[in-house]
Image (spheres, helix red, strand yellow):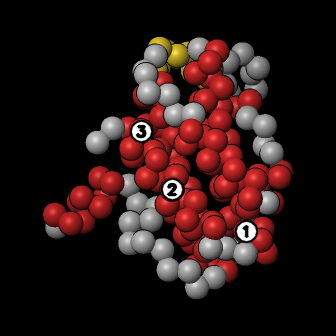
């Protein structure tokens, strides 16, 4: 199994779940998510992946510069199209990258970290799973869709539970 296979599996799981939602459910504000919508969480996942995709081309990734595309969080079809594009553009080769991040809200000077594409892909995979756990809460609040048992659960947690 490769990191690409794992990312593809998670993104296809995400796609299948949002494809079952109505447009209204996708954009409904959910109290248990502090008023956030499923669409907002989906947008966040996808925009982080888009940042990595763009960073691969330039050699520098900065997740703070994501576009925050309202259409992606308010139109399921736009989110699904973006998801398909991400799946098509997963790079097979690892390469060194620089991660640019500002962890201090009082400073505009970013910190620079050496990283690589596979490491950032793994980060995005874990990040997506985390948000899918929140999306699962949202889906349960607005619909009766039955999600797979491991939806929004890290593979290490699934293995741990199965071994217990």
Horizontal placement of 48 versus 36: left or right? left
How crowded pointer 1 is (Cα within 10 Å; few <14, some 14-19, many 20+) is rated as many
How crowded pointer 2 is (Cα within 10 Å; few <14, some 14-19, many 20+) is rated as some
Kindly report the distance in space between the C-alpha atoms of the residues bearing marks 3 and 2: 12 Å
Q: Residue at x 72, y 16 (%)?
A: 109
Between 53 and 84, the one nearer to me in the picture:
84
Between 57 and 141, the one nearer to me in the picture:
57
Between disc 3 and disc 2, whose residue precedes?
3
Between disc 1 and disc 2, whose residue precedes?
2
Residue pointed to by mark 3: 4
Q: Secondary structure at mark 1?
A: helix
* Quarter of the picture holding the C terminus: bottom left
Q: Position of residue 98 (x, y in %)?
A: 55, 15
Residue pointed to by mark 1: 26
Kindly report the distance in space between the C-alpha atoms of the residues bearing marks 3 and 1: 27 Å
Residue pointed to by mark 2: 12
């Amino acid at each position: 199994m490769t990191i690409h296979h794992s990312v593809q599996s998670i993104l296809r799981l995400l796609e299948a779940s949002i494809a079952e939602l109505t447009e209204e459910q996708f954009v409904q504000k959910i109290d248990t998510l502090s008023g956030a919508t499923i669409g907002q969480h989906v947008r966040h996942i996808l925009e982080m992946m888009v940042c990595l995709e763009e960073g691969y081309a330039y050699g520098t990734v900065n997740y703070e510069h994501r576009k925050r595309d309202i259409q992606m969080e308010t139109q399921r079809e736009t989110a699904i199209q973006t998801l398909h594009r991400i799946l098509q553009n997963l790079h097979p080769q690892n390469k060194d990258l620089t991660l640019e991040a500002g962890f201090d809200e009082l400073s505009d000077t970013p910190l620079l970290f050496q990283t690589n594409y596979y490491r950032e892909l793994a980060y995005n995979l874990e990040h997506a799973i985390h948000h899918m756990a929140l999306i699962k809460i949202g889906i349960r609040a607005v619909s009766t869709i039955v999600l797979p048992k491991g939806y929004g659960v890290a593979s290490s947690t699934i293995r741990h539970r199965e071994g217990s």
